[in-house]
Amino acid sequence: MAAEKETATEQRILDAARSVFLRKGMMGTRMQEVADEAGINKALLHYYFRDKQRLFEEVFCVCGKHGMQGVWEELTHDRPLFGNIRAFVAAFHTAIEREPLFPHFLLSELQRDPQHLLKLVDLGKGAREHFFGQVMEAQQRGEIIPIDPRQLMVNIMAWCQFPHVAAPIIKHVGGMDQKTFKQFLNERSTLVAELIIRSIRA
Amino acid sequence: MAAEKETATEQRILDAARSVFLRKGMMGTRMQEVADEAGINKALLHYYFRDKQRLFEEVFCVCGKHGMQGVWEELTHDRPLFGNIRAFVAAFHTAIEREPLFPHFLLSELQRDPQHLLKLVDLGKGAREHFFGQVMEAQQRGEIIPIDPRQLMVNIMAWCQFPHVAAPIIKHVGGMDQKTFKQFLNERSTLVAELIIRSIRA
DNA sequence: ATGGGGTTTAACCAATTGGTTAATATTGCG
DNA sequence: CGCAATATTAACCAATTGGTTAAACCCCAT
């Protein structure tokens, strides 16, 4: 039917665009390449998405929302700070497993076009505020050392994202094939939280 | 004199290319733009550096060597592990202050062209091996928890580099202007080492 | 069968891009 | 000063790129 047929072509374009944008970024991606990967005529990209920028924004938006779906919420559960940290790191790990190129893509595009990324980041604002509150309370109760909650947030995000952003370096330096690297990352899914907690526990 | 004059134009090109490549990456940089910034005719880029790829590699090479000059060596001094970690982090902080865009540039280019970056990373190989040895010894002496030295290396690099790679996000999320962000980074120049040490101390 | 709306195609377009070329200018040395 | 080598310039080039256009195609309702 017409409605399904329309969705199919749009979806094919979005899937192909996602694949190419994630690998090559906005500036490195050619529209013909996206069309080739979608198996369509290049003019259809413009018919459905008007121009490259809009296609990119759509992909960016969909990736960003799906990529972090349910992850920020792990920081807002009614449980102790350390439990929230563990759950958040594990959820982050699971999310990135679905799309390992996503952190690199996001951070790569950051200089060129910060606005869209910053909008995406705002989706987790409430969760971070809750987390910051928990961090301050834990300090007041003497459970953790004095630390700016923002520094702690950066530390968590750094350990969750950096290995994916720097994956080729880490593999090379650590002498790992893809399978070993995957194990290395799996180890981190619990190690990161434990080391974060050790770094701040009073 | 001819030798100096030659160096002057080459240097102007390299400086301009560095500035543009760092901001826009290889794919986003246009040769005319580099020429404009250097204040020269575009054909000179090809006269001196033959093509875009070679210019890029030259810039990459110079940046990479200067960027980490003296930093890896801080891991090899004859002093305890924790001292080496502190010195390394402080040296890293100083190095990045000289060129804040460098980590983002390096990691952005990583997917597109891993080879050159990996060559650069190999410059620190000896230092890392020394460091790994120290980590293993510290474990055997019971000074630190059992941990794969590679995980520890990744953790250190992550905390040193990520705030620069993700700078626009961190400023936005933390509600910081450039001055405040700079203070935030300065705080990390000692905080990072202390938290790393806390995370592994037995 | 016909008409209308939506989808797809192939050809085309203007601008941009990295690179080339030949002429000119500059420099340094004998 | 003259000459040769090097540096610089402006014009030019072929290919690529994102985007446009008009025709053809498809499907459905009357």
Image (tube, coloured by chain):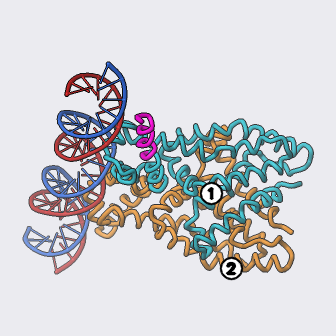
Chain colours: A cyan, B orange, C red, D blue
Depth check: A109 or B11 in front?
A109
Q: Measuring 73% from the left and 58% from the top, which residue is drawn there? A: B192
Pair 2/1: label in front: 1
Would residue A46 be counted in the magenta stretch? Answer: no
Depth check: A9 or B187 in front?
A9
Would residue A5 be counted in the magenta stretch? Answer: yes
Quarter of the view holding residue B75: bottom right
- Residue wearing tag 1: A97
Report x, y in % for residue A85.
Answer: 78, 50
Quick one: SS at disc 2? helix
Quick one: SS at disc 1? helix
| Amino acid type, residue under disc 2 in the picture | His
Q: Which residues are magenta?
A: A1-13
- Residue wearing tag 2: B130
| Amino acid type, residue under disc 1 in the picture | Glu
Q: Measuring 69% from the left and 44% from the top, which residue is drawn there? A: A70
Alpha-carbon span between mark 2 and mark 1: 32 Å
